[in-house]
Image (spheres, rainbow, N blue to C red):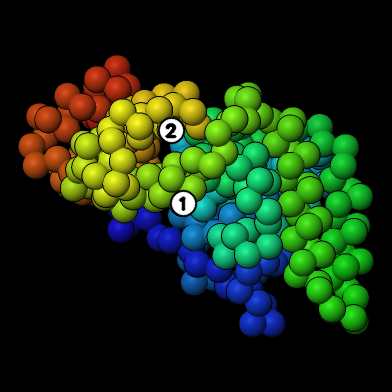
């Protein structure tokens, strides 16, 4: 939905791939005013890790409210909608990095294991009680303060990659896929769904674009999500619909049209089939 602002990466010192931000500094900037309101729902055009080192609070990600406390790490994937609470009483760091940073510096095998990057539906967003946050933060600080920046991006990426793998081990509920050679195809399918869900929810259309059979596509998607390709597509439509209802001022008719339904009746039937409630009831319950 166009009414949910998408925030692109705006690093300092012309950096466009990775940034390490002290939350106190960020909260000061928020009070001074930014080009968007971080307390309102906004969509990320990059990945983020919210690492809490002191205090308590909460954070909204895709309609869910997560409790924050010392030792909590909140993983926010590219494309997710999130919002900071007003007047936060916790401290820590925000680590943001782009998809280009991941693809250029992470190993392919690691990307396949770190499911939250591209398939956050099967991985918990919040991980509590992390006992390796402090060493990671301190190592990052030391590296980023180095005057000798030779291979610095590679070193930072290696540190982040290892940290994410350790996080994934704690939060993973699905076994890593055995046929990892199909992971690029799954990612391509996911990207196609995000770009084309308004115009088609037909599995065959996506299979044709990927030059594979519908049966083969279903097998691949099941491998990574434990659900069918159709289930993945419909789930994404429902998620975008809920995001729009919760975060915009559009009417239900406008939202239905925006996610690919010409008739409100069909939109209502689809939503109720997958959520056991109508869009109107969902909105009323927010």
User: Vertical placement of 12 versus 64: above or below?
Assistant: below
Q: Give the alpha-carbon distance from disc 1 to disc 2, as whole Å.
A: 22 Å
Where does the C terminus fall, quadrant-wise?
A: top left
Residue 189 located left or right of residue 157:
left
Residue 132 found in image quarter: top right
In primary-sequence order, the first of circles 1 and 2 is: 1
Residue 197 located left or right of residue 178:
left
Q: Which residue is label 1 attached to?
A: 79
Q: Is residue 2 visible?
A: yes
Q: Percent from the top left, x then y, of residue 252?
A: 20, 40
Instruction: Name the foreground residue: 174 vs 246.
Output: 174
Q: Is residue 21 visible?
A: no
Give me the residue at 56% from left, 60% from top.
99
Dot 1 and dot 2 residues touching (CB under 8 Å): no
User: Vertical placement of 174 versus 247: above or below?
Assistant: above
Give me the residue at 37% from left, 55% from top.
4
Discs 1/2, front: 2
Q: Secondary structure at mark 2?
A: helix
Q: Which residue is label 2 attached to?
A: 220
Q: Secondary structure at mark 1?
A: loop
Q: Percent from the top left, x then y, of residue 197?
A: 26, 45
Instruction: Name the foreground residue: 145 vs 23.
Output: 145
Neighbourhood count class around disc 2 (C-alpha, 10 Å): few under 14, some 14–19, many 20 upward = many
């Amino acid at each position: 939905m166009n009414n949910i602002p998408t925030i692109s990466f705006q690093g300092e010192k012309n950096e466009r791939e990775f940034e390490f931000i002290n939350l106190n500094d960020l909260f000061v900037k928020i009070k001074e005013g930014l080009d968007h309101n971080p307390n309102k729902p906004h969509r990320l055009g990059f990945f983020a890790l919210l690492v809490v080192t002191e205090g308590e609070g909460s954070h909204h990600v895709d309609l869910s409210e997560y409790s924050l406390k010392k030792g909590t790490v909140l993983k926010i994937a590219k494309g997710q909608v999130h919002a900071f609470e007003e007047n936060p009483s916790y401290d820590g760091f925000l680590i943001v990095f782009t998809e280009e940073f991941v693809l250029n510096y992470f190993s392919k095998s690691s990307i396949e294991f770190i499911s939250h990057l591209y398939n956050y539906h099967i991985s918990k967003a919040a991980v509590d009680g992390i006992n390796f946050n402090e060493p990671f933060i301190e190592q990052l600080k030391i590296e980023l303060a180095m005057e000798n920046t030779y291979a610095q991006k590679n070193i930072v990426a290696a540190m982040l990659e290892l940290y994410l793998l350790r996080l994934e081990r704690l939060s993973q509920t699905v076994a890593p896929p055995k046929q990892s050679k199909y992971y690029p195809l799954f990612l391509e399918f996911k990207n196609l769904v995000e770009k084309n869900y308004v115009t088609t929810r037909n599995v065959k259309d996506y299979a044709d674009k990927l030059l594979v059979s519908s049966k083969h596509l279903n097998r691949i998607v099941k491998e990574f999500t434990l659900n069918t390709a159709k289930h993945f597509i419909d789930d994404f439509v429902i998620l975008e619909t809920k995001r729009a209802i919760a975060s915009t001022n559009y009417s239900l008719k406008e939202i239905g049209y925006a996610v690919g339904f010409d008739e409100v009746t069909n939109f209502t039937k689809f939503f109720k089939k997958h959520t056991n409630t109508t869009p109107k009831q969902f909105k009323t319950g927010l």
